[in-house]
Image (tube, helix red, strand yellow):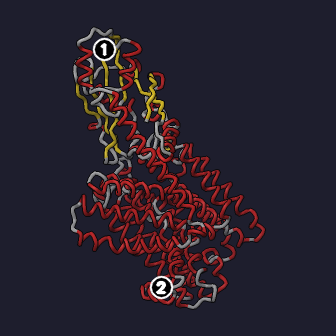
Amino acid sequence: MSLKEADLPADPECRKHSAAALILGAVGVVYGDIGTSPLYAFRESIHLVSKDGLIESEVLGVISMLIWSLILVVTIKYVMFMMRADNNGEGGTLSLLALVRHAAGRWNKFAMFCGMLGAALFYGDSILTPAISVLSAVEGLKLVTPVFKPYVVPLTIFILIGLFAIQRHGTGSVAKWFGPITLLWFFTMAAMAVPHIIKNPHVFMAFSPIYAIEFLIEHSVISLAVLGSVFLAVTGAEALYADMGHFGRGPIRKAWFWIVFPCLTINYMGQAALVLDKAEAIKDPFFLMAPSWGLLPLVLLATIATIVASQAVISGAFSLTRQAIQLGLLPRMDIRHTSASELGQIYIPRVNMVLLVGVIFLVIEFKSSSAMASAYGIAVSGAMLIDTILAIFLLRMVWKKSALFTAAILLPFFIIEGTFVLANLTKIMEGGYVPLLMALTIIVVMVCWKQGTRKLQAKEAKMTIPLEDFAMSVAKKNIPKVQGTAIFLTQDSSMTPTSLLHNLKHNKMMHEQNVILSVITETTPRIDPLYRTEIGAINDHFIVVRMHFGYMETPNIAHAMQYCKKMGIKFDIMTTSFFVSRRVVKTASKDVLGYWKDRLFIFLSRNAARPSDFYHIPTDRVVEIGSQVTI
C-alpha cells in the first residue's frame, strides 16, 4: 500500500525513506513514551482499589478504563482527528497555536495563553517522563534481588546524567537503533502477557465499556483518584501529534494500529489476568508476568526502552524551545545542530541543563515511581485539554465549521479530558503541585518576555524615523562614504535601525551600499529557500531585505544571503560588515509588580544569545553598537 502525499512527513529528507522505515522510526520515537506506561499505569490504578481486597469486577473495571482510554483519547482523538489538524504537515501545541492565533480575533489573547500553557505543561512532561520512566524500570531490580534496593535511586541518577551528557554529541549514531529496540520492547510486552491471558481468557470481557461504567458508578468515592492513575496509560499520546512532521500521518497511524495498540492492550490484559490468578502480584504486575529466568533481561530491556522514550521527549523539548523562540515567547538561546544531514537534530545547552537539574531533583525528592505518578498525570492531561481548546478555535475560526459540528466533534473529548484533569487535581498535595509550579514559572517567563519585548519595540519606534525619510535626507547631504557593504539588522525594515543612526552619529560616515535586513517568522513550519528572501531598493545606497523563516527553522543569515547574490545584490560575505544593536535596558516602573516584571525581562535579555550566534553571522564580521533604553 503506497502512502498518500498528505500522509508523508513535512521534512523532504524523510520522504526519501520507505514506508516500512518510517513506520519503524515512528515506533521508536513517537511511541516510546506511551510504550513505557505499562510499567506503572495498571499498578498505580489497581493499588487504589486493593486496600480492602480485590474482586474480579474491580480488576476488569480498571482494565476496561485503561483500554477505553487508549481507544477514546489516543485512537479517536489523536490518531484519527488531531492528526488532520496539521500546519503544513507539522503538529504540536505551538503549531496549532500558529494556525489559530491570527484568526482568533477578540479571543487572540486567550488562544495565546492556551498555547503558552500547553508549552509550559509539555516542559513539565519533559522533566517527569525521564524521571518516572527510568526509575520505574530500574525498580525492577528489586524483584531480582532485594540487595539492589538501596542502589535504585543512585543508579537511576547515574543513567539520567549519562543520557543528558550525550545530548551535546547528538543522537544520530544511535537513533537508528531506536525503532528496532522499541519494536522488540512492544513484542516482548505482548509475548510475556499471552500465557497469562490464555490462563484467564475472560479478561477479554474488559473490552466492554460496561465494566468501566459500572466501576465508576460503584466506586464513586475513589473513582476520580483511579481515573487519575488510569490516565497514565495515555501519557505520550501528544507525541503522535507533535512528531507528525518527522514521520508523516500515514506511518504514525499504521504503527499505532498494527503494532502499538495491539501490544499495549495485550500487555494490560496480561497484567490483569496475572492479578486475577495471583493477588500478591499486585505489587508489580508488569515485571512479575515474566518467568524468573527472564526477569533480569526484562529489567535491562525496560531500562533501555525508557532511555529511548526519554530521548524522544528531550528532543521534543529542544524542538519546542526553538518554536517558542521563533514565535517570540522565549529569548534567543544558543541552538546547535548536531547533524549535518538531519535538520531536526538540535541541542540547546541551557534547556538540557534545566531538564537535567529538574529530573535529578524529582528522583531525589520522590524516590519511587509510585510517588512520582501523582505528579505525572497533571502535566499531560492539562496539555491534552489545551490541544482540544485550540482545536475548537481551529474548527470554528479557521475551518469555519458550525458550532453544532464543532461541539459534536470536540465536546466529548473536552468532557473526557476535563474529567481527567479534575481527577489529577485531587493529587496536588501528593506531588501534583510540581508540574503546576513548573508551568507557572515558564508562563511567567513567557509573559514577561512577550510584554517586555512589546514595550521595548514601542519605545524604540518613538526614537527612530521612517527609513525612506532618512534615505532622502542623507542623499541631500555630503556624507563621506566608504567602499563595501554594511548590513543592519532590525525588527522593522520600514524604520531606520538604531545601529545605523548611531554609526552615522559617531563615525560621521556611511558605506556605499547599506542593506536593511529584517528576519520575519512565519506561521508556517518551513519556508522554501527560493521564496525566503524579498528585496526592495530605496535608492542607490539603501536596499531593504526581508528574510522569511518558518517557526520550525533556525535562522541562518549567512547562508540565506547567498540567495541575495542570485537576485542581483553584489557583495562579498567576508568583506561585509554586519551591524547589530546591543541594548542596555533599564526600568522606569514605580509600582512593585511592573518593576518586578521589567527586572525579569532585563535579566532574560541580558542572558539571551548574541544575535551573531543565533542568526549564524560570521563573528569576525559583526559590529555591535550599544545603546541605552528605558522601559
Residue 84: x and y in percent read: 30, 62
Q: Name the residue under label 2.
A: 216
Residue 629 or residue 381, whichever sits in front: 629
Amino acid on which disc 2 is placed: Leu
Q: Can residue 2 be seen?
A: no
Outermost residue, front side: 590
Residue 577: give its label.
none
Compared across the picture, whether 524 is left or right of 331 comes to: left
Q: Which residue is drawn at 36% across and 12% down?
A: 509
- The span from disc 2 to disc 1 (Cα, nearest Å) is 77 Å
Compared across the picture, whether 530 is left or right of 330 comes to: left
Residue 374: x and y in percent read: 57, 69
Relative vertical location of residue 388 with respect to residue 358 in this rendering, above or below: below
Residue 354 or residue 571, whichever sits in front: 354
Residue 512: give its label.
1
Q: Identify the element where label 1 is drawn.
A: strand
Relative vertical location of residue 326 with respect to residue 543 in this rendering, above or below: below
Q: Which residue is drawn at 34% across and 57% down?
A: 111
